[in-house]
Amino acid sequence: MNIGLVSYHREPNYGTMLQAYALANAVQREGVSCAYLDYWFARKPIWRRLALKLACALGLTNKGEFAFFGTKEFRCIRDKFAAFHKDFIPVSRRRYYADNIECALNDYDKFIVGSDQTWSPYMNRNPHSINFLQFVEDGARKSAYAPSFGTLRITKDFGERLSALLESFKYISCRERQNCAYLSSLLDREITYVVDPTLLLDSKEWDKIAIQPSMRNGEYILAYILGEKDCITQYAEMLGEKYHLPVYYIATRPCYLHRPHVLDKVGPQEFIGLIRNAAYIVTDSFHGTLFSINYQKEFYSFAKREVKMGEVMNDNDRILAFLQELGLENRFKEDDDISLELPIDYKNIHEHLGTMRTFSRLYLQKIIK
């Protein structure tokens, strides 16, 4: 058995790359070979590829709000991600494009659309996206493990598109319970709720690749913030003052480079070690929240973005939805909430998460058998 995986796996985002690692690891643990399809929307002449590499090296590219990743200040982080991808993420030997993706049908027995925001309305505007496995006509070869829409609010137009795209899938699951209910109603079939791939591995399994930070265990607060809301940094600093601990910021945006304790050499392995050894974690990240729970840490989660009046699509509510699954909704803080909570009693939470993990592993086994 050889399985082709489809998910985001190259992006310099800790959650994205670690969920890709986790899913591949879980599949391989079942004695099955797998690889992520090395898929590119279109071919580029060699001179364009070289020009793009040069522009990235000089920090001259403009990739929207994440253009700063092409600057020299973030070069070390880029290198860390590239090294982790090379060492830990299985990728197909063949490179696929829109005009040769059918070759994958001969290279793999089954295909699994993985997690992260692979079914996001925003991420699938390119007509050549393969996140719905349109190139696979045999539905028996098509499955999905924990894809996310990145939101709990689906428009009518996108729902109609989903109905046509997912009809032939043999197995469909989702990592948000609300979206499972939505898809069940839309497709008139049972959609399975499973955990994010990062939770398929417990903390001991993550320890195998974690890198120990230089700070002493339990003697710092970790701020892993993807947005730029002042209230989140203010809360982290408030915790630092209360517990007399330094606040270390992972450099996720240029604004954090100027913090007294900035961490600008953090790759995926260092990220795990930082979560594991922190006394407290303050984050607006979905995966930052999940890793905090997996390591049974004291944490506080915030919404990453300001929600505008009438806005339909946002990725804030998925964090609260998962916290509610575990009875941890008090750990989700509104912007003006500066209160502290009692320490988390992880006993029942750990047991519940273990049950969810076991169920999800069995579901994955059913897909790949």
Image: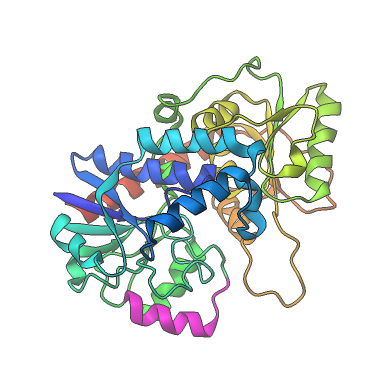
Residue 37 is at least partly visible in this image: yes
Does 291 sit left or right of 42 as displayed? right
Q: What is the total number of numbered labels drawn onto the structure image?
A: 0
Does 255 sit left or right of 215 as displayed? right
Bounds of the magenta span? 153-166
Q: Looking at the image, is 126 positioned above or below residue 302?
A: below
The way the protein has been coloured in the rendering is rainbow
Residue 305 placement (x, y as % from top left):
72, 59
Residue 105, quarter of the rendered image = bottom left
Residue 61, quarter of the rendered image = bottom right
Q: Looking at the image, is 94 positioned above or below residue 204?
A: below
Residue 96 placement (x, y as % from top left):
28, 59
Q: Nearer the viewer, residue 112 or 123?
A: 123
Residue 187, quarter of the rendered image = bottom left
Q: Nearer the viewer, residue 360 or 278?
A: 278
Q: Looking at the image, is 175 positioned above or below residue 17?
A: below
| Residue plotted at (54% across, 28% down) | 270
| Residue plotted at (44% across, 48% down) | 10
Does 6 sit left or right of 302 as displayed? left
Residue 211 placement (x, y as % from top left):
50, 22
Residue 144 placement (x, y as % from top left):
33, 61
Q: Looking at the image, is 253 positioned above or below residue 218?
A: below
Residue 188 is at least partly visible in this image: no
Does 332 sit left or right of 4 as displayed? right
Does the segment drawn in magenta span residue 174?
Answer: no
Q: Nearer the viewer, residue 173 or 141?
A: 141
Does the segment drawn in magenta span residue 161?
Answer: yes
Magenta stretch mostly in which secondary structure? helix
